[in-house]
Amino acid sequence: MTGDIRMETAGTLIDCLMRQFPFDVSAEEFVRNPYPWYEAARRTHGPVHRTRSGDVVVLGYFEAQAVLRDPRFGHGAQTALEQTGYGVPARTFLLTDPPGHTRQRERVRRAFTTREVLSLRRRISDLAADLVARAARSGTADVVTEVARPLSARVVADLIGVPEDLRDRFTEAASLLVRGMDPPELIAPGTRERIARARVCLARDIGVALRRPGGTGLLRALARDTDGRTARAETVATCAQLVAAGYETTVGLIGNGTHALLEHPDQLARLAAGGHSERVIAVAVEELLRFDPPIQLAPRSALVDADIAGTPVPRGAVVSVLLGAANRDPRVFPDPHRLRLDREPRHLAFGLGSHYCLGAALARLEATAALRHLLRRRPRRTGDQVTYSPARVARSVQSLRVRLDPGADARP
Ligand code: HEM
């Protein structure tokens, strides 16, 4: 059992979770490597499984695609302030349904254009180069804490326009909010309280930042577009969503991706042979997203009586779409547990359909820059163990120490 779960409640907890999932998601081995568990469940139950609680777990690629594209599956809320199908307020448009979702998503999309993201390319590359150079100075470094976290924190904070004095509080809250996506039974009461407090503090800080004159980034764009109390609450929820969605996920991609490459020296050598060019690394990032995606589960509820590939799903049933399992479906990815950088990119790591990730271009840019600068310094394993965050929905390496060539400035 992980330290986050109380031993005295372990029996009831496992029983409760085993009703919802066909494997023990509370197990430490599951946190370290959920893929053999997905594989065993798919072999036993097929791509769609009705669990003992009557809920549904989707393990197959085509079935995951079908659910994510199907408007019969959603969240049961139309605005960020309504209740979702799970009985909690949506709080963000990630958990709302059309038409409310469409309007809120469009507001962000307008303020978050591809041109805006691409204009950050040079700055992201410079930031990554500096962080890697600093991390490499002593010859060994923690890729997660010294490169991935500061890079992701700075990029998201700049993009949103978080004032300097509030940045540390924002990133701390972001990590906690992502942890709050797990089933509550998996979160210790103390952590649950910290998550609730972080939610309130983040909303208050965003309110403060929105009122300050001369703001920058998305906050300024959204503030201009905000009038009335509901719109203001929605703007606060939207900004909180962007901080939460954009920070820990990108950290996960860089950490999980570096780890996957170190575990597959033949693929690492392939990148070196390609001269670590931006184009080659950008292609590699797609396979890293398939292989070990930072978001493992997209939750939905059946809004009406429905079916998934012939399996009936009654209205109200919770549907857990396991993106990490779908990405290893052997019908689509032969030899799915092998990292192969020459695969056609077809992963579901950014979701699909109406909720498709709005930050995909930004995450790709950050991961490409970070990996490019890291790989130029020939990362090698140390004897230290890799550790994982205790979160299940968001999966990320928490600490990954590597040897790096200090060398001269490796900037291209
Ligand atoms: C590797 C990094 C990332 C991964 C793996 C990722 C993954 C995802 C996934 C799977 C969804 C869909 C969830 C669902 O359908 O239930 C999603 C939605 C979203 N993501 Fe990302 N994300 C990443 C980075 C980012 C970044 C950097 C941002 C913004 C700064 C961002 C903003 C969003 C937003 C706003 C949504 C909600 C879209 C909607 O509901 O319409 N993400 N992301």
Image: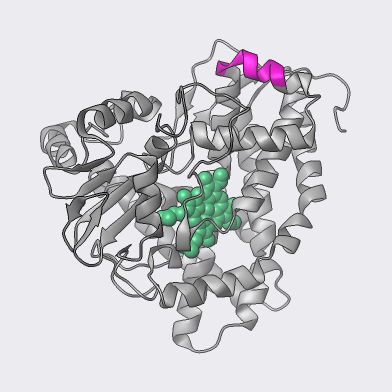
Instruction: Identify the residue shown where x is 44% and y is 84%.
Output: 230
Closest to the observer: 176 or 265? 265
Task: Using the image, determine if residue 131 lies above or below residue 401.
Answer: below
Residue 396 in the image, given as x and y percentages of width and height: 48, 35
Q: Residue 119: which quarter of the image?
A: bottom right
Closest to the observer: 251 or 6? 251
Residue 275 in the image, given as x and y percentages of width and height: 81, 24
Q: List the single residue furthest toward the top.
A: 383
Task: Using the image, determine if residue 196 lies above or below residue 369.
Answer: below
Q: Is residue 109 left or right of residue 391?
A: right
How many numbered marks have been drawn onto this rendered protein structure? 0
Residue 380 in the image, given as x and y percentages of width and height: 65, 14
Q: Quadrant of the N terminus?
A: top left
Instruction: Identify the residue shown where x is 77% and y is 18%.
Output: 273
Task: Using the image, determine if residue 192 lies above or below residue 334.
Answer: below
Residue 129 in the image, given as x and y percentages of width and height: 79, 36
Residues rendered magenta in the picture: 263-270
Instruction: Identify the residue shown where x is 76% and y is 55%.
Output: 118
Q: Is residue 13 left or right of residue 38?
A: left
Q: Quadrant of the C terminus?
A: top right
